[in-house]
Amino acid sequence: MKGLRIYKYGEPILRKKCAQIKEVTDEVGETLAAMSRTMYESQGVGLAAPQIGLGKRLIVVDIGDGLWELMNPRIVSRRGETISLEGCLSLPGITVNVKRAKEVTVEALEKKGEKIMLEAKGLFAFALQHEIDHLDGVLIIDYLEKKEKKAVEEKLKKWLKETPKM
């Protein structure tokens, strides 16, 4: 089965705060599986539900150490600070330096509905923070200074005009 369409900059779903998953269902499991497939096909390290047009608190992450499929993730603690150069499947051709925590503790439900606590550092911490931002309608360009953000948004708008609609 082919992966799902990834929503791009300018589509309203990317700016909405997502709803909590209230019940673990087969449909949620199927959505997580489709998200994982889409992430791998797109050669990403993470994907959040709004990026496939769904306003639910679901993310998938795999930095090369195995797949994490998480529901209702939330950061419960942050430690340290660093700058990470990040791209995003919803912002084609854009990379941005983002100030993030070096390490995070994330509470979430895993695919079977069990509550877990993840201690993450490095790329795993950055990926979790990036995907959780998506669940709150935050994009990497929101970390830019006003002038830089405007320039990047102009580049994205130009890209949108030149890209055929699906």
Image (cartoon, rainbow, N blue to C red):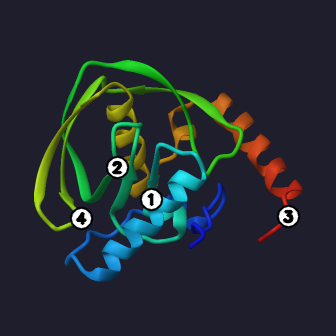
- CA distance separating discs 2 and 4: 11 Å
The image shows a total of numbered marks equal to: 4
Residue 35, image x, y percentages: 46, 63
Does the residue at mark 3 contact the one at mark 4 (Cβ under 8 Å)?
no
Does the residue at mark 2 contact the one at mark 1 (Cβ under 8 Å)?
yes
Q: Which residue is mark 4?
A: 111
Name the amino acid, label 1: Ser
- Could you tell me which residue is drawn at 38 percent across and 18 percent down? 82
Name the amino acid, label 4: Lys
Instruction: Please indicate whether residue 152 sits to the left or right of residue 86 in the image.
Output: right
Tag 1's secondary structure? helix
Instruction: Please indicate whether residue 133 sits to the left or right of residue 41 in the image.
Output: left
Name the amino acid, label 3: Pro
Name the amino acid, label 2: Leu
Crowd around label 4: few <14 · some 14–19 · many ≥20 (10 Å): some
Q: Which residue is mark 3?
A: 164
Of the numbered discs 4 and 1, the one sitting upstream in the chain is 1
Does the residue at mark 2 contact the one at mark 4 (Cβ under 8 Å)?
no
Q: Which residue is mark 2?
A: 67
Instruction: Please indicate whether residue 93 sits to the left or right of residue 63 in the image.
Output: right
Give the residue at the far front of this rendering. Answer: 1
The nearer-to-camera label among 3 and 1 is 1
Of the numbered discs 2 and 4, the one sitting upstream in the chain is 2
Crowd around label 2: few <14 · some 14–19 · many ≥20 (10 Å): few
Residue 68, image x, y percentages: 31, 51
- Could you tell me which residue is drawn at 26 percent across and 69 percent down? 20
- CA distance separating discs 2 and 1: 8 Å
Of the numbered discs 3 and 1, the one sitting upstream in the chain is 1
Depth order, front residue of 57/64 = 64
Question: Where residue 36 is drawn, which disc sits there?
Answer: 1
Of the numbered discs 2 and 3, the one sitting upstream in the chain is 2
